[in-house]
Image: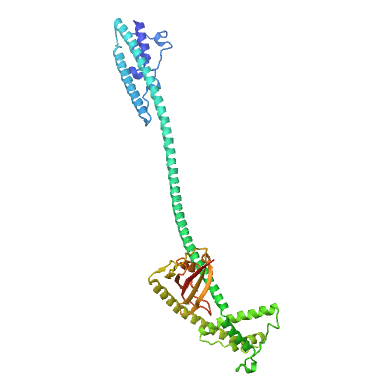
Amino acid sequence: MRKLLYLSVVLLSTISASAVGADSTALLERLNKENIISVGPKSPFTQTGIPASPVVMPANSAPVKPSVAPKKDASEKEIRLLKSKLAASRREVQALRKKQAAAVPAKKSDEQVNAASHENIRLKQQLAEATKRHVQDAGKFQAISNENSQLQRQLKTSQQQLAEAKKQGAEQNAKLQLTATKTTDHVKQLTEVNKKHGEVKGQLDVATKKVNEQASRIATLEEKLKQSSAEKERVQQQLVAALAIPRKAEKEPAKVSNPVFSLAANKSEQAKTNYAWGIWFAEKVQLESETLKSAGQKFLPPAFLQGLQDKFAGSLQMQPADIEKVLSALNKRVADARQRDMTSNKKQGQQLLADAAKLKGAERAESGVVYLVEKRGEGAAIAANDVIRFKVDEKVSSGKILAKGEIHTGRVSELPPLMRAGVEKLVVGGRVRIYIPVELAYGEEGIPGAVPPGVASTMTLEVLSIEK
């Protein structure tokens, strides 16, 4: 009987204080007091192997505070299942404890002790199995908790990386947006530059056309000057006559039968060069004499030649200050006269172009030139490489005639653009009238002595034939 009680006490001593409600020492004292067992030095209840202090349950038997549930559904389900199993194990342990407490009365019969012993053994086995399952479940729960903690750390790291990536992405988007804005601005600037380049190119083309046309006009005028042999002869005679006048008889010049300088007696190249230069200078003097007329002055060849002679001789009849004063006043009168003529001539030219554009059959080009085909002709067609023979009449808006029935020849592709555009509208025998605005004619300044300032031009061109 005592052995049975001893086994019961040993069984109870293996259970934790929380399982039986009291420690093993208190239980032994109670059994000794009631004379159920005797506790002595050699008592089996004091032998090594019986714990004097309550047996503490493993740490993992205590409830483990779960970590933050992972976000994955599988982990959450597994944790909930383990929690459920752990709670069931706890309830089973409590039930066994109650049965064990009920199975140990203060005084029992041998049969009761045997039954209690068997019951304790069975309960101990159930408790061991429950404890084992509890430990396994706690281990699984701890492993899941550790895995969950690791996943949480990974999630936190991933969230930090995601936040950093979002931050970098936002910075990159801002940079891309700034780059896109700059690119748009650059495209706009490039478009403006291209537009301005096109405008400048167009202006350059127009200016080039003007230069070519003015060069053609100048060439025509130079040709006209060369053809004015009669006028040159008259001026030459005046110059020769003036050079032969003695200073004492300036008021009544006398005619001389022989020139002062004869090329027949002086046949050197220097003599010819100086003579030709004198003729050229006389032509310039003739043109400049028109400047005097525009300022209300009369050209006096004797006084002019005397000024040349005195300058070469170094004996001036006027003080330099007086000469400067006279020339300054002359320049002012000439400038004022040219400005008045320019303003008046420009108005006349604009009116001329406006009236011409209203004529039946007139065509106005983008440059402002007006073409009026008076007669298309009935002859052969004209190609760009053809050399044509044509007649030209020209008059400016001020009324001055620059050309009358002049005959010219030239290749169509090499003609000034304005004339070429007119010829392309004709066949052989055709005639076109071309109204040229101030800018494309002779400009605001004109040609001093030859073409008034600010005039428009009217040119009539007739194709006579194609030269073989």
> Depth check: 443 or 374 in front?
374
Q: Is residue 323 above or below residue 387?
A: below
> Depth check: 196 or 218 in front?
218
Examine the rendering and report whether any part of residue 9 can be seen.
Answer: yes
Q: Tell me residue 234's x, y (percent).
A: 58, 85
Count of marks placed on residues: 0
Examine the rendering and report whether any part of residue 29 can be seen.
Answer: no
Q: Is residue 295 above or below residue 62?
A: below
Residue found 39% across the figure and 10% down from its top: 45
In the shown orientation, is residue 101 left or right of residue 230?
Answer: left
> Depth check: 457 or 16 in front?
457
In the shown orientation, is residue 303 left or right of residue 356?
Answer: right
Q: Quadrant of residue 143?
A: top left
Q: Is residue 270 above or below residue 140?
A: below
Q: Tell me residue 319's x, y (percent).
A: 61, 88
Which color scheme did the rendering employ for the protein? rainbow
Quadrant (top left/top right/bottom left/bottom right) for the N terminus: top left
Q: Quadrant of residue 15?
A: top left
Q: Tell me residue 203's x, y (percent).
A: 48, 65
In the shown orientation, is residue 410 left or right of residue 364?
Answer: right
Residue found 41% across the figure and 75% down from its top: 351
Residue found 42% across the figure and 35% down from its top: 156
Quadrant (top left/top right/bottom left/bottom right) for the C terminus: bottom right
> Depth check: 78 or 312 in front?
312
Residue found 44% across the figure and 38% down from its top: 161
